[in-house]
Structure formats: structure tokens, C-alpha cells
Amino acid sequence: MKTSSKNSTPRIILFWSVPSLSQINTYKANCDQLQKACVHSNSVQVLNHKKEAQTFKKIIKESDGFYGLRRIKGEIRKMMLNVNSIKTIILL
């Protein structure tokens, strides 16, 4: 007797769609916060998923990517921000 695989297909789609929707919402919220930091030119503290905190003097947007400006040993350096790895953004 053969079993039908038609019943398992919607379960798989539901299983994969729920996490992806939550990731899209998180990505959009992080982009909105970074965009707000760009406009207001505030200092920003970024906490990533590894619980590492980084503080940036300013956030800028160039070529569809966000960069944080940070002072290291008297020099201002530009670091690319990976929006997917950001957990929390705090405007200072």
C-alpha cells in the first residue's frame, strides 16, 4: 500500500515559512533603526548575536550597506555592519 506524500508537503512549507517571516521582520526592524541613526547622526551601540557590544560614533549608508565609524588608536575607521548578525541597536 502506497502512502500519499501530498499531506506532508503543506507541513514542510509551513515549517520553513514561519522562521523566514520572523527573520524578515527582524531584518526590517534593524534596517529601520540603522536608518534612524544615519539621519540623527547619533552614537550607536550594536549588540550582535554573540553578545559582543560595539559602539560607533556615527552610522553611514553607502552603496546599499551600513557602515559604522569608530575611533581606533586616534584614527576613524569605517566598519561594515552585517544587518543579519545584529541582535539589538541602541541609540545613545
Image (cartoon, rainbow, N blue to C red):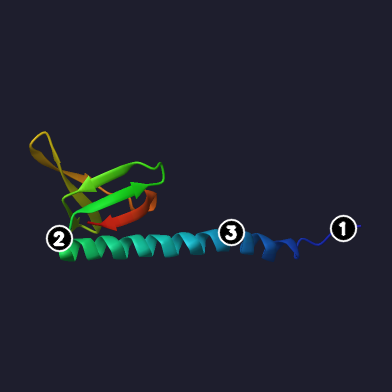
Q: Residues within 10 Å of mark 3 (few under 14, many from 20)?
A: few
- Between discs 1 and 3, the one toward the N terminus: 1
Q: Is residue 28 above or below residue 69?
A: below
- 45 vs 81, nearest the viewer: 45
Q: Which residue position is annotated with label 2?
A: 41
Q: What residue type is labelled 1?
A: Lys
How many numbered discs? Answer: 3
Instruction: Tell me the quarter of the picture where residue 59 sits.
Output: bottom left
Q: Residues within 10 Å of mark 2 (few under 14, many from 20)?
A: some
Q: Residue 2 carries which label?
A: 1
- 57 vs 69, nearest the viewer: 57
Q: Which mark is residue 16?
A: 3
Cβ atoms under marks 2 and 3 closer than 8 Å? no
Q: What element carries label 3?
A: helix
Q: Is mark 1 on a helix, strand or loop?
A: loop
Nearer the observer: mark 1 or 3; the answer is: 3
Nearer the observer: mark 2 or 1; the answer is: 2
Q: Distance between the residues labelled 2 and 1?
A: 64 Å
The residue at 66%/59% (across/down) is 12
Cβ atoms under marks 2 and 1 closer than 8 Å? no
- Between discs 2 and 3, the one toward the N terminus: 3
Q: Distance between the residues labelled 2 and 3?
A: 38 Å
Q: What residue type is labelled 2?
A: Ser
| The C terminus sits in image quarter | bottom left
Nearer the observer: mark 2 or 3; the answer is: 2
